Amino acid sequence: MTTTGDDRTTAMTGPWWWERRLGAALDVGLAVVSAAECGGEGVVFARDAGLPTAVGVGFGVLAGSSLLFRRRWPVAVVLIAIAITPAQMGVLLTVVGLYSLAASELPRRITGALAGMSMAGTLIVALVRASQDLAKEGTHPPIGSEFVPFFAVAASIGVTAPPVLLGLYVGARRRLMESLRERADDLERELQLLAERAEERAEWARNEERTRIAREMHDVVAHRVSLMVVHAAALQAVARKDPEKAVKNAALVGDMGRQALTELRQMLGVLRTGEGVKSAKPVEPVPLAAVAHAAAAAASRAQDEDGPCLAELDELVGQSRDAGMAVDLSVEGEPRGYAADVEQTAYRVVQEALTNVHKHAAGAKTYVRLAHRAAEIAMQVENEPPPEAGSADAGLPSGGNGLVGMKERVTELGGVFVSGPTDGGGFRVSAVLPAAAG
């Protein structure tokens, strides 16, 4: 689990500029050791310089204690180490200071310049000290002239190169880890954003599927049941007066019921899960977005295969005529094949319009017009006022979703839908669909 920048800032529990207490304790320990080393070497420095011992020790302790600030001001620590190099003190200060400088975020040219200055100072001090030691021991010049340069170069490289190289390696590794951590944080945020977007898309797909199913069920149930209610009322009226007509109406009610059940089974079949799956293996979890997409695709395939089409329009009008409605169907233009969703939408618009006539204007003369045009198909259902005021409403329940569902269907395909009362007191429903909408 990665930590974000805010988490890392909160995790800084050390005092002042230290990120952790362990780092602070380490720097304090190094500063104490460095102060002790420089203080001890200050005794020799004070004796050689002719100063009081206390002054030399105090100077050494003060200079060595500067190692406490190696993380905050590494340049200052290295400069102090270079400054006290002629006094032959501060080896630990020099080594740790150069390491801290190389591992910091400072430009490499500054690190190189200070490392070069430290190496030069160490080289000069080593040459002088080696020469003095050889002179005290009385070594012959030939031996001394060969030994002194080698010792000085080895000492300067040994004190300077290892801490600088180690610091460069640690700094590069630290920057690499920080870069990887930031990339992991970015990736985690992106994954979280993608998960939120996927959930939003899944919710949108669920809502779309609910709307589509509700619309289909309204179209199927409302039309078929409305016709069944109309035929049942007619059956009740003529049961004793005209038994033959009553039998015919009863047969029509049965046919309507069977057709309604068939359409409901076809539509609800796409909601079944695991149909045709005979494997005994457990089903792996599937993302919700994929389920919604698969359901929508299955529903679309079911509509394309089993949905109503314009060829069934005559049968639809005939059912309304059998229910006692005076319906006039006219077709303009040359009929041709359209996409399945276009034909289904056109059929549903006419079906719902006829259902509304059964509900609200029973017995009214109705005109159904269908026009095949070059780039579009137009349909219109218009009814006259009902012949009797008492028959204006058949008493069928209405949810107020019929016109809304028709408009949604048409606009989804890029068409135009208009509905409203006519000047003569009737009602008109008009829709135009692009022929290539599918």
Image: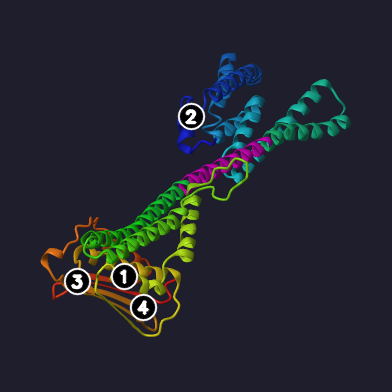
Residue 53 position, x and y percent, is 60, 14
Q: Which residue is depicted at the point 88% across and 30% down?
A: 143
**Image disc number at residue 11:** 2
Q: Earlier in the sequence, mark 2 or mark 3?
A: 2
Q: Which residue position is annotated with label 1?
A: 350
Residues under labels 4 and 2: Cα distance?
A: 69 Å
Q: Nearer the viewer, residue 52 or 401?
A: 401
Of residue 337 and residue 187, the one placed in the foreground of this image is: 337
Depth check, front residue: 132 or 59: 59
Q: Which mark is in front, 1 or 4?
A: 1
Residue 85 visible somewhere in the drawing: no
The boundaries of the magenta stretch are: 166-194
* Mark 2 element type: loop
Secondary structure, mark 3, is loop
- Amino acid bearing label 4: Ile
Q: Main secondary structure of the magenta part?
A: helix
Q: Quadrant of the C terminus?
A: bottom left
**Residue at the location (42% across, 68% down)?**
341
Give the distance between the C-alpha atoms of the residues marked 2 and 1, in whole angstroms: 69 Å
The quarter of the rendered structure image containing the N terminus is top right
Q: Within the magenta stretch, is there residue 399?
A: no
Q: Which mark is residue 364?
A: 3
How many C-alpha atoms fall within 10 Å of the one at disc 4: few (<14), some, or many (≥20)?
many
Look at discs 4 and 3 and give the one toward the viewer. Answer: 3
Colour treatment of the image: rainbow
The answer to whether residue 192 is magenta is yes
Tell me if 352 is positioned left or right of 200 in this view: left
